[in-house]
Every structure is written in C-alpha cells, then in structure tokens.
Image (cartoon, rainbow, N blue to C red):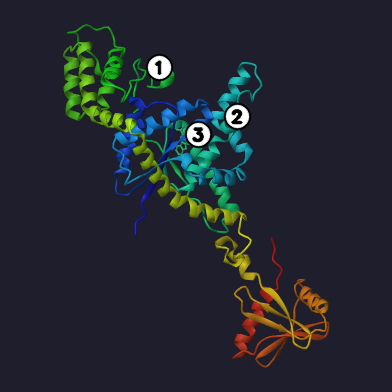
Amino acid sequence: MTTRTRILTGITTTGTPHLGNYAGAIRPAILASQDANADSFYFLADYHALIKCDDPQRIQRSRMEIAATWLAGGLDVNRVTFYRQSDIPEIPELTWLLTCVAAKGLLNRAHAYKASVDKNVESGEDPDAGISMGLYSYPVLMAADILMFNAHKVPVGRDQIQHVEMARDIGQRFNHLFGNGKEFFTMPEALIEESVATLPGLDGRKMSKSYDNTIPLFTSAKDMKDAISRIVTDSRAPGEAKDPDNSHLFTLFQAFASKAQEQEFRAELLQGLGWGEAKNRLFQLLDSQLSEPRERYHQLMSRPSDMEDLLLIGAKKARAVAAPFLAELREAVGLRSFVNQAAAPVAAKKKAAKAARFVSFREDDGSFRFRLLSAEGEQLLLSRNFADGKTAGAVTKQLQNGDALDVRTEATGFSVWLDGAAVADSADFADETSRDAAIAALRVALTPIED
Ligand code: TRP
C-alpha cells in the first residue's frame, strides 16, 4: 500500500483574500489537492487570527470570506479535509502538551516575536510592550496544527519556514521524552512553491495589503477594473514599443495566461499597444477566469448556513483523526484513567509487563495467605499460611525489597525462602524447563521498577 502524502496548511483569518493570495496560495493549493496521492488538510487558522486582531467583527467577516473564497475557487470538500481550527478542541489541548516541552530559548528566537521586541527597543519602549503571550507562543500553536495530523508537507510562505522548523524541533523533543522508541509525530517539511511567483501589486512591489497595492479578487468586476486602471506603467505613448519584461502589468497577465495568450500579448506590446488597451486585455483575461467563481462566492456569502454545514463536516473528519491520537498522547504523558491501568497502551507496556501484584486472602482456619499474580493474572506463587495479616504483609514487603531471591527447586516445582524458612511455593510444572522459565519470570516480576 502506498501512503498518500499528507499536505496541511492554515490560512490566518484576518483579511480579505486578494488576487495575489489567489495566485500565490489558494489556486496552487486547490490544484495540489486534486492529485490522487495528496491527502490535504486545509484550515482556517482562526485561533492564530486572534493573536493579531481584537475586532470580533473583522475576525468573523474574514473567516467567512476566506471559507467562501476557497470553496468558490473549486476546493472539493469531499477530497480534502477543510475545517476551522477553532472547531477542533484537540488543537489547544495538544498546544499545552507541546508548550510543556518547548524550550523557551527556542521561542525567544522566533522572527515574529523578535521583530516586535526590536521595534520596541528602537523606539525606546519596554522590550515587552504590547507583546502578548499569544504572539510569543504562536509557533507552539502552529506546531500543534501541524503535528496533530502528522503532516508530511506544509506549503507556506518563506516567512513561515522557521515555524515549520520549530514544529520539527518540538515534535522531536516530545517523541524523545515520551515515545519510548515510538515516533508519535512525523517530521514535517516546509514546501515552498518556487514556481508560483509572488504577484506584483499596482505599484510593482509585492502585492500586499500592507502596501495598499492590491487587486481585489471576488468583490465585483467593477472593483477589479478600477484597480487595474491604477496599475503604474511607464510613460510610453500608444504606438511606442513597450518592454514586456520590465512591466508588472505583463507579469500579472502572465500569471493567468496560457502560453499562446502570453505570446500574443507580448507581441502586441512590442508592436506598441497602448497601456489603456493593455489594461483592458488584462481585465478581460482575469474576468474570463474569475467571473464564475465570483458568482459562486457571492452565493456562498449569501447562504452562510451552507458553509457552516460544510465546515462542521470538515471538523468531524478532522476530529476523527485528532481525538484518538490525542488520547494516545495523553496516555503517553501520564494523563491516564485511574481504572483499567493494565490496559494502558504502548508507552506504558514495558512497565505494566513487570507489574505483578499480591492478592491476600484468608483461609477458613483463620490463617492469612497471599498469591502473587503476574500482570497477565497468572499465579506465580502461593504463600504458606501465616498466623496473622501483619506477618503475611511483612513477607510480601520483603519479597519486593529488591534483595536477591532465595529460590529452591524441588523436582518440577520451587519454593521461595526468607530467613531460613519457606514462605511460598510455585505450582507444579510439566518439566524443569517450564519450572526454570517460571523462576525467571518471578525474578523479573519482583524486580523493583525504576522510573
Ligand atoms: N502562521 C501561518 C501564516 O501566517 C498560518 C498557519 C497557522 C499555518 N497554522 C499553520 C500554516 C499550520 C501552515 C501550517 O501564514
């Protein structure tokens, strides 16, 4: 059986997606999810959004807009697991388990946090001014997002590579501390799509909300047209040859055009196509590809309960993976039920195998005895009779104190001696080999467990 590559990425829900987000992240992710070998987990990182934004209206609007954008863009929710981070209670729970193994020194080095500190220091403020614990622990939450689902590949922007490395670091430490030889967490790798160029914005710098140079994606055809009309060009007049390779208008066109369309446009620019007409061509191209998803987007936004349903189904799928895995992790760190301890899984096995127990009982004649049972419940020893419970108890204590056992064989059985007297006997075995095996098992059972 070939295992599919698990691809996971989160989208922080603070803004409204623009054309640059679409071409740089959304479109390639949707395409990647169509690969038969991909098992994709895409989610709205709305807990992360709370770190940067305390405007509930904006958080809510952005969650809906981003969900609608991905769905309108063709994300097939039957193929991928699409969910809201905040619908998965296992994520904050895992975050805490990871917080307890994450080195503070590691988090001190996180770029996002360091940048805020540097800014404070520069402006003569207290280094910690305005820095929340959310910002500081942001990489741990992100590690939980990734490790919870054992993602192999994490498509992210360059600014996020460090966070994926931290996830590896933290996951490795957890594996080492609690895995007992088992690797709970898969080591994730950042996936940087070299082929998708970041789109230039209206002014030629990277398209970004912080530069206020974006082209809107699905708001309306008119908004898109207006933005395109504001693309900065050189001052060459119609009829003068344009230089496609030094025009970000051409770069934008390229990002959506077929090879043939691209070549035609290039030739036209070289032949002196006016910038006004060139902008028209760009609008036509974008509109031909985006008008249908734009319509779907507005439909989705007008029926939020449909989206709610889809996302709750996604959450259910995600939790079907997360809940049993988290149960295993809780066991591993020692957050276990007080009952059924023998059923404790994997990590506890080695110790449980050794954990034999004494069961005392009283005979009809009033004397006290005990049995020593293996972890599997099979009888290893039956004691002689003691006049009172106190003596019987003292004997069981002495047997567990780690001293070398005085075992004496008699034919196919054996007895255990303390201070010159036999205190307990084995069953009678079929042969000497099984008798000796039982003696070995007894010694193991009575070896004190080291922590
Ligand atoms: N921090 C990421 C960003 O700002 C978003 C994110 C949150 C994420 N959790 C993630 C990305 C897990 C990949 C995997 O872009």
Asked if residue 109 shows in the view, the reply is: no
Q: CA distance from mark 1 to mark 3?
A: 23 Å
Return the residue nearer the eye: 362 or 146: 362
Q: Nearer the viewer, residue 351 or 326?
A: 326
Q: Earlier in the sequence, mark 1 or mark 2?
A: 2
Say above or below: 72 vs 445.
above
Give the crowd class for mark 3: few <14, some 14-19, many >=20 residues within 10 Å: many
Q: Are marks 3 and 2 in contact (CB under 8 Å)?
A: no
Q: Nearer the viewer, mark 1 or mark 3?
A: 3
- In the image: residue 381, left or right of residue 291: right
As drawn, the label of residue 212 is: 1
Q: Position of residue 277 (x, y in %)?
A: 19, 13
Whether label 3 lies within 8 Å of ligand 1 gets the answer: yes
Residue, disc 2: 132
Residue 90 shown left or right of residue 280 in the figure: right
First of labels 1, 3 by sequence position = 3
Cα distance, mark 3 to mark 2?
Answer: 12 Å
Q: Secondary structure at mark 3?
A: helix
Mark number displayed over residue 48: 3
Give residue 200's quadrant in the image. top left
For the residue labelled by badge 2, is the local secondary structure a helix, a strand or a loop? loop
The x and y percentages for residue 234 are 29, 9
- Residue type, numbered disc 2: Ser
- Location of the N terminus (image quadrant): bottom left
Estimate the x, y position of residue 157 in percent, counting from the top left. Answer: 42, 32
At label 1, the amino acid type is Asp
